[in-house]
Image (cartoon, rainbow, N blue to C red):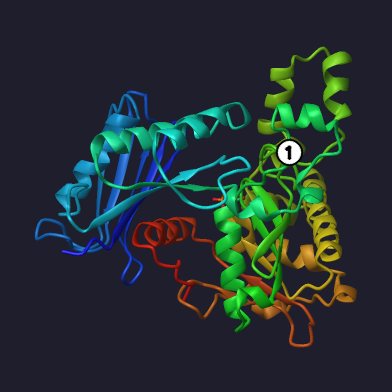
Amino acid sequence: MTATRVLVLNSGSSSVKYQLLEMTDESRLAVGLVERIGENQSRLTHVCLRRGSPVASEGERRERVEEFADHEAALRAAAEELAADGLGLDSPGLAAIGHRVVHGGQWFTRPTLVDDDVLAEIRRLVPVAPLHNPANLTGITTAQTLSPGLPQVAVFDTTFHTTMPEHAARYAIDVGTADEHRVRRYGFHGTSHAYVSRRTAELLGKDPSEVNVIVLHLGNGASVSAVEGGRCVDTSMGLTPLEGLVMGTRSGDLDPAVVFHLVRVAGMTVDEVDELLNKRSGLVGLCGDNDMREIRRRIEEGDERAQLAFDIYIHRIKKYIGAYYAVLGRVDAVAFTAGVGENSPPVREAALAGLEGLGLAVDPAANEAEGPAADGARLISSRDARVAAAVVPTDEELEIARQTYALVTGREPRQTG
Ligand code: AMP
């Protein structure tokens, strides 16, 4: 049996998401989530999407609520569910496991087969990604224990941004200090920016190398990137995912002196400021809600705090569109993706309002409509707009699976389609 399946693992601090894909037709065979790992009421939700054995039926959803004490217990349970569907980790059809790794620093410029050196390097990056890399590491080492001999591939959120030129990647601070402590702009959500920029080129009927795209990944975390001919030349997140756009709970850009001020004048500790800027800022800090649906509902009822939060959020997006327009010189498309970008017509409309001078204009009916393509990707610009506007649902798992499969089979990743 040829090995044509890839298991994608996204290990967070207290959760593991997984998807099993068949790469010959890029279909999902199973998807699942283990939440609240380490608590006594952990929950595993598993959906078998295609029959892998006579045992499981298509679309079957199973749930287990029990204690999964650690990632190993969680992954073991996920492996049991897959095995029950005839899709176990020891199945000869499984080619590799692809792991999402948030921080790959400057040197991981492509997906990488995991060995001891790679693990050590991911571990060395923990100080710059303390929330994410430890969980990603645990996911990899647990998968190694459960499926020895199977190729494990690390796919980094930072890789797509490693093409940024030095003038975009460096902060204007003392070079010696920056280099000693690896302080530079890395960018995140790279798998999403890579996927969406390529899919946007396809929507335009062009090769990615021919188009310049501004990708707006607007989820609970949010980032924007400037993609020139398929290569990232700038992105809004920096050393950590705190820089850039206004997010669900993160402030995005601010004067760094705000931190000194809060420490010196407000008497806050550095950890308290860290928590404030990452967890109690952004939309939630401004109006108490971080769900765009709720914010829009409040605006409809005349809530001024919600309106101001929305206006600040949109203003920041506009500033980045302008900045990246200037960075790229010529823009072919602006693409919206992730939870807010894919689902909020008012955000898309407001973000592009008044940008006719830049060639951008939204068609109101297209902005409200569902997409014709199976994956929901569609154009929402008006006919006479010089620059296309698009909604492109992101698919980070598919992108990770493609890159993983390409690495282990020695083939180029296939394009979206
Ligand atoms: P993500 O991080 O990509 O999963 O995005 C999550 C965010 O998407 C939520 O916090 C909401 O603000 C937003 N979202 C999800 N569904 C909708 C919707 N139908 N309309 C507006 N915003 C939405």
Q: Residue 268, image x and y in percent?
A: 78, 15
Front residue of 234 and 386? 234
Q: Does 145 sit left or right of 181 as displayed?
A: left
State whether residue 35 appears in this view: no
Q: Quick one: 142 or 312, which is closer to the camera?
A: 142
The location of residue 25, given as percent across then percent down, is 33, 72
Q: Residue at x 58, y 55 (%)?
A: 339
Left or right placement of residue 376 versus residue 56 in this view? right
> Image height check: is 376 above or below 318?
below
Residue found at x 51% / y 33% = 121
Q: Can residue 249 be spotted in the picture?
A: yes
Q: Amino acid at mark 1?
A: Arg
Please name the residue shown 64% across and 60% down the image: 341
The secondary element bearing badge 1 is classed as loop
Pick the front one: 17 or 266: 17
* 180 left or right of 360 in image: left
Residue 208 sits in quarter = bottom right
Is the residue 367 above or below the residue 139 in the image? below
CB of mark 1 near ligand 1 (< 8 Å): no
Location of residue 122 in the rendering, given as x and y in whole percent from the top left corner: 51, 34
The residue positioned farthest toward the bottom in the image shown:
384
In the rendered image, the residue lying farthest to the top is: 267
Q: Position of residue 29 (x, y in %)?
A: 28, 60
In this view, the residue in front, 331 or 290, is: 331
Circle 1 crowding by C-alpha within 10 Å: few under 14, some 14–19, many from 20: many
Q: Residue at x 58, y 61 (%)?
A: 194
Q: How many numbered discs, if any? A: 1
Question: Is residue 346 positioned above or below 388 on the image?
Answer: above
Q: Quadrant of residue 370?
A: bottom right
Q: Which residue is mark 1?
A: 184
